[in-house]
Amino acid sequence: MRNLCSALIPCSGGCQYCFAKWDDIYTKQPLLSTVRINENIFSVLYPCCDGEFFEQDNCFSELKKILCNRSCVCVDISTKRHLKTDEISELIELDRWLKEHKKGFVKFSISISTKSRITELEPNTMNYEERISLANSLKQTNILTTLTIKPVLPFISSDEYCEIVKDFSELISYITIGGLYVNLSSAFYKKYIENKYPCIKRRVSWLDSKPEWFYIEDTEKIIKIKKFASVLGIHVFDSDEELIQSIN
């Protein structure tokens, strides 16, 4: 079961393709301080996918309050933001606390959609070298660290994505991968997608309301990336839920 939490502080990444900023579904999710987790089944707590988890007041103490009387929880945090040393320390402590009390574990994902055009498409995020450095730092810890290649952008080549996989291959063992949700009225769509790539409607299964959003998936490209990752011994999944279930 996936539990989404809304953020008090909006994400400052400025990613041009971001879907969280054009659909109000995220503002309707409970805040981290009010989320309720089912104690009887394994749950995935996904905080602040529309915002900055680490910029929330007392984010780690709030998490511990929520999880104090719960077990079987994966705290799934994904970011493109550079982490400070004290934030990494708090992540390590949260993971240690969860495991020590047999409550669950932290899954931390570094998110990336391009290597060559980060400044253009993800202007306020970590640069590529910082993402590599963060993965290297986390490899020295016991935190499950993964790479999220979402969205796979139709105008970024499969060779570039395979290069990303190779660059991270010594640092991570798991990847999640997926296509691009688009808003047909957005500036991003008009500049990068319109009249260039076909869109289909796809039901969003991980939201309670199950909305249908326009979606682009280059199946051939994704298969090529998966095969390349497999040769390097990396496990690739279509969703976080699949990845977590495979190791839980």
Image (tube, rainbow, N blue to C red):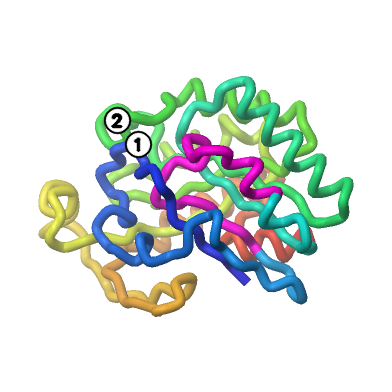
Q: Magenta region: which residues?
A: 44-64
Q: Amino acid at mark 2?
A: Pro
Residue 26: quarter of image: bottom left
The quarter of the picture where the N terminus appears is bottom right
SS at mark 2 in the image: loop
Q: Is residue 200 above or below residue 131?
A: below
Q: Is residue 28 above or below residue 9?
A: below
The residue where tag 2 is placed is 123
User: Mark 1 or mark 2, which is nearer the start of the sequence?
Assistant: 1
The quarter of the picture where the C terminus appears is bottom right
- Asked if residue 89 is among those painted magenta in the image, a careful observer would answer no
The residue where tag 1 is placed is 13
Q: Is the residue marked by circle 2 packed among few (<14), some (14-19), or many (20+) residues within 10 Å?
A: some
How far across and how far down the image is residue 247, in percent? 77, 58
* Nearest the eye: 247 or 164: 247
Residue 135: quarter of image: top right
Q: Is the residue marked by circle 1 packed among few (<14), some (14-19), or many (20+) residues within 10 Å?
A: some
The residue depicted at 55 percent of the width and 55 percent of the height is: 33
Residue 141: quarter of image: top right
SS at mark 1 in the image: loop
The residue depicted at 57 percent of the width and 41 percent of the height is: 59
